[in-house]
Amino acid sequence: MRRAALALAALAMLGLTACSSDKKPASWEAGAGAGASSAPAPAAAAAAESATRAPFAENPDGTVNRSPGAQPAASNSKINAGGLGPYRIGVTLQTLQSAKLVTAVTPAKSCDNYTTAQGVTKYHSPQLVFFKGKLLHLSIGSPSITTDKGIKIGSPLANVRSSYPGDKQLDDWTGGSAWLAMTGDYALLFPVRDGKVSQVQAGMAEPLQFKYTDNQGC
């Protein structure tokens, strides 16, 4: 009789163990399965992600607007915060490819969702950076093109500051400096070397700033 009671008790314990093993860990109940990560996305990627949504709503005529801070209209002869000619910030890579306005299209190394390309010589061969298929920013390396306020490669920093007052200086991780001239959510960036503009960049302000100061993004 005693042996039977002990056998029944052992079976009961086994049953309890089996039932308890069916219960998932608290982390699973909360949705955090094995291998889940809560690490935040890099700041530049988050800024670029935001930039490809609201700022890039296209109107029927192909222009891009956002309120507040509507995008400046792009000019064919001068670069501004809204772009240069057909390379308006927010235009799709597909649109530029269809018009045969880009060459050397390649996925950016070590940058998910980024693509780089080069514009045609008619527009001074701008270097183009796309995020999720939309133009995020561009760079001009030719002294032949000026901004809408007459600034170009080789212009003294003092001229940049007087042409774009009220904006701000940025410092990068190597000790270099640049002047960021914002127009709403868009901006012109002027990296400076030996007191003169060495390049002119245009695009979404936040990604431009993160790229220059923290070397984040492409």
Image (tube, helix red, strand yellow):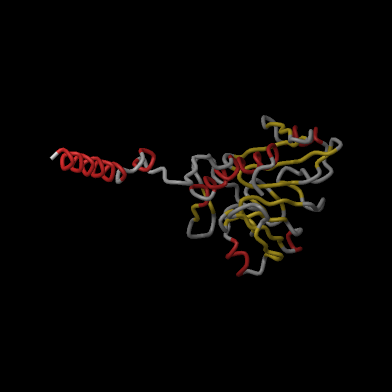
Observer-nearest of 58 and 194: 194
Side of 61 where 150 appears, left or right: right
Whether residue 89 sits left or right of residue 165 in the image: it is left
Q: Is residue 191 above or below residue 127?
A: above
Is 41 on the left-hand or right-hand side of 188?
left
Image: 127 above or below 69: below
Q: Is residue 181 above or below residue 144?
A: above
**Whole-percent x, y for residue 10 in the image:** 23, 41
Taking the spot 76% from the left edge, 44% from the top edge, the residue there is 150
- Extreme residue toward the top, this view: 166
In the current view of this chain or complex, which residue is farthest to the right?
194
User: Where residue 189 sits in the image (x, y, percent)?
Assistant: 70, 41
Q: Nearer the viewer, residue 15 or 25?
A: 15
Q: Nearer the viewer, residue 137 or 109?
A: 109
The quadrant of the image that shows the N terminus is top left
Identified at 75% across, 59% down, the residue is 125
Say which of 40 and 131 sits in front.
40
The image shows a total of numbered marks equal to 0
Question: Residue 190's image quarter?
Answer: top right
Residue 72, percent across and down?
A: 60, 47
Q: Is residue 92 left or right of residue 155?
A: left
Residue at image point 65% right, 43% down: 216
Residue 126, image x and y in percent?
73, 56
